[in-house]
Amino acid sequence: MLLRLALFSAALLSATVTFAAAPADKKVDKPSDDPQQAAEANADWVEKLVEKCQPSVVVVTVEGRDGKQDGLGSGFVVSRDGLIATNLHVIGEARPIHVRLTNGKKFPVVSIAATDRALDLALIRIDAHDLPALELGDSDQLRQGQRVVALGNPLGLEHSVVAGVVSGSREINGLPLIQLAIPIEPGNSGGPLVDDRGRVHGLLTMKSAVTQNLGFAVKINALKDLLKQPNPIPMARWLTIGALDPKEWTALFGGLWRQRRGRLTVEGAGAGFGGRSLCLAKRDVPNDSYEIAVTVKLDDEAGAAGLVFASDGRDRHYGFYPSNGKLRLSRFDGPDVLSWNVLYDQPSSHYRPDDWNTLKVRVDANTITCWVNGQQVIESSDVNLRGGQVGLAKFRQTKAEFKQFRLAEQLSDDAPAADVVARIEKSLEKLSPAGVEAKVLDDLAKHAGPSATLIEQRAQQLEAEVKQLRALSVNVHRRHVEQRLVAELALPDDKCNLIKAALLVALLDNPEIDVNAYLEEVDRMGREIQATIPKGADEAAKLKALNHYLFTENGFHGSRGDYDHRANSYLNEVIDDREGLPITLSVLYMELGRRVGLNIVGLGTPGHFLVRHVPKQGEPIVVDPFEGGELLDRAALDKRLKDLAGREATDRDLVGISKRAIIERMIRNLLGNANREEKQADMLAYLDALIAIAPDAVQERLMRAVLHYQAGTPKLGLADTEWLLKNEPEGVDLERVLELQQALERAELRRSEAK
């Protein structure tokens, strides 16, 4: 994290403090020799000011990744038509935002009218009118010692106010601020700083780390520039968490459809007949015949959710879906029950209740054929509807999840061949409590999909083996991902697909990720950037277009409030949420730059990953994608590394690192997270991946051997101690390694005797 983030850390907290009105430093009216009378007079002006200004102060709340409140701050009305001023760090980036007035009314933010990252300012708009706006003052006219009042409204509590004086002006990281002899608290960030006439001179922004009685505010004159030249962003662009991609899907009849991690989820009754809600794919459907498929899971088997096809975009379409534990093929000829035709409604032994099920439909000129989990269940000769769109549907109050939606003239058969099934079953017979041998894992991983399916089926059949089999399923998947990572990173650096490798890192933990879909998404992003670049543009113009697309137009940003969240290390979620770590944002930046003809390399700077644009002509430029594409000269880089690593930059810091080194660093970030969370199984998975791509990783082998001892799988740990003793790497105490090996051998002997 950067040094300046530490200055904002208190303001980013969601805690709220309400404090009582404090008397001003000097009295307001004519002098009095009576101290009590003077204090009462001073308190009276604060009270009147609060009464005047408080109706204009609002609460700003921000949702986190789980839909719950993640941040809270203040703001104030600057125009009667619903324009609210606050700090940029209060609203975060790419998050749902709400505003609550002092009368208790709550409004969603409908657009981001303007933002300025450097000044930490934001203007947001709500759909409300006749709001009491505060008058803006002239912050250049503020005098040292002038009395001011800081207002806020954390959690909607009234009269959260403190009075004090302007103690001076200070510049912090290039940001000119009003320094206040006032204790500003986190919940008041974004609130107004007003003079004794109620004119706003600043926005409260930071609590001092030096003393409790010192605060800061951004000068209001900076906000005036935003008001004159807004840069509006509609919420449809701002909100990326869970939003359907309008270029891919169209939702009809209501219901709440969300898109996350390559899955679509839906809940809430739709407005169509039977609580029907549709989500149609914006894809070209083959004219003569085609197949569609999706894997679906219902939260309640009394509901219904599945595929729709031959849709006219409204009420007419077919549907194939599980309903009440049966499989149903229906034709909807209109909006009501009278136009509903059930063509098939029967149970199937191939359908797995309360589990994932793959539905597939083939549409030909004269037939409709339906499968569940690879088994044909329906063949209908109904020909009333053809053409149209395809997509998904759900009915009633069903909550459902969809993944792996596919459309093609002919889809590949996912059912494993009989010899593959026999081979997998033979491998499963070799299981032992000591763990799975590497050779068995390698064999299963060659058929990862069928392996996972058969393992899960056996887990359901043999309850006593469920835990082991599910762990095996994860291990098979992860080994399969390791194999793909090894193969990708074995390519020469100029041939290795860094986006694919980074997605495979995320795939270690998230088997549902559709890697190809995200690869296509990054290619699409590259084409969108290229389309904005004039023909013959130089590299500086291309770099500017890249920065504008990522950071201005689409709001990609460094994660602050959720910095340690694992999602920031998963490239697919960084693409979905437009929020990430320095290294994940840098990977996307580098690869999008490459797609528009820029040579951008990764810099393995300690504590904060950076990139370097190396033009064909001219001086290289260091860029920080975490900070919105900030350009760093050598002095700025020296300062950055001094803050992070206690030293200035060296020439070695400016040498681009390999794609393998980038992937290793990404996995080590996840390893560090798992270590902090004390998740032993995840730590082992990350160590397996690291050692697979870097077999000479000595410290990782030591760590893995110890973890296997702790996990009760000593036989697996012995492989690492044997490697260490055989290769005798420098810097390793081989006597300690021998002691560890002997401990593992004793543990394995005890385990064998207990069988």
Image: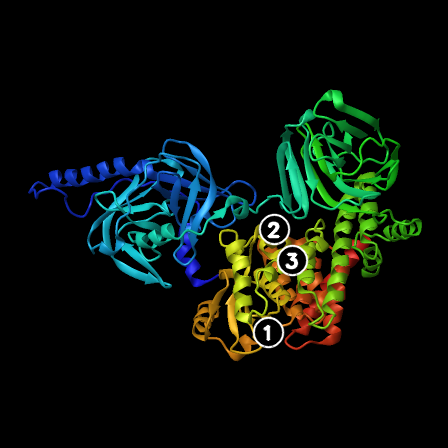
Left or right placement of residue 500 versus residue 206 in this view: right
Q: Percent from the top left, x then y, of residue 11? A: 40, 50
User: Of callouts 3 and 1, which one flags the residue occurring earlier in the amino acid sequence?
Assistant: 3
Say if residue 607 shows up in the picture. no
Q: Which residue is mark 1?
A: 656
Give the amino acid at mark 3. Answer: Val
- As measured in the structure, the alpha-carbon distance from the residue carrying label 3 to the one carrying label 1 is 22 Å
User: Of callouts 2 and 3, which one flags the residue occurring earlier in the amino acid sequence?
Assistant: 3
Mark 1 surroundings: few (<14), some (14-19) or many (≥20) residues within 10 A: some
Left or right placement of residue 465 versus residue 226 in this view: right
The mark lying in front, picked from 3 and 1, is: 3
Q: Percent from the top left, x then y, of residue 477? A: 76, 54
- As measured in the structure, the alpha-carbon distance from the residue carrying label 2 to the one carrying label 3 is 11 Å
Q: Which residue is mark 3?
A: 522
Mark 3 surroundings: few (<14), some (14-19) or many (≥20) residues within 10 A: some
Left or right placement of residue 326 versus residue 594 in this view: right
Mark 2 surroundings: few (<14), some (14-19) or many (≥20) residues within 10 A: many
The mark lying in front, picked from 2 and 3, is: 3
Task: Specify the color scheme.
Answer: rainbow
- The label shown at residue 576 is 2
Observer-nearest residue: 206 or 538? 538
Q: Percent from the top left, x then y, of residue 678? A: 61, 53
SS of the residue under disc 2:
helix
Give the amino acid at mark 2. Answer: Asp
The mark lying in front, picked from 2 and 1, is: 2
Residue 529 lies in quadrant: bottom right
The number of discs equals 3
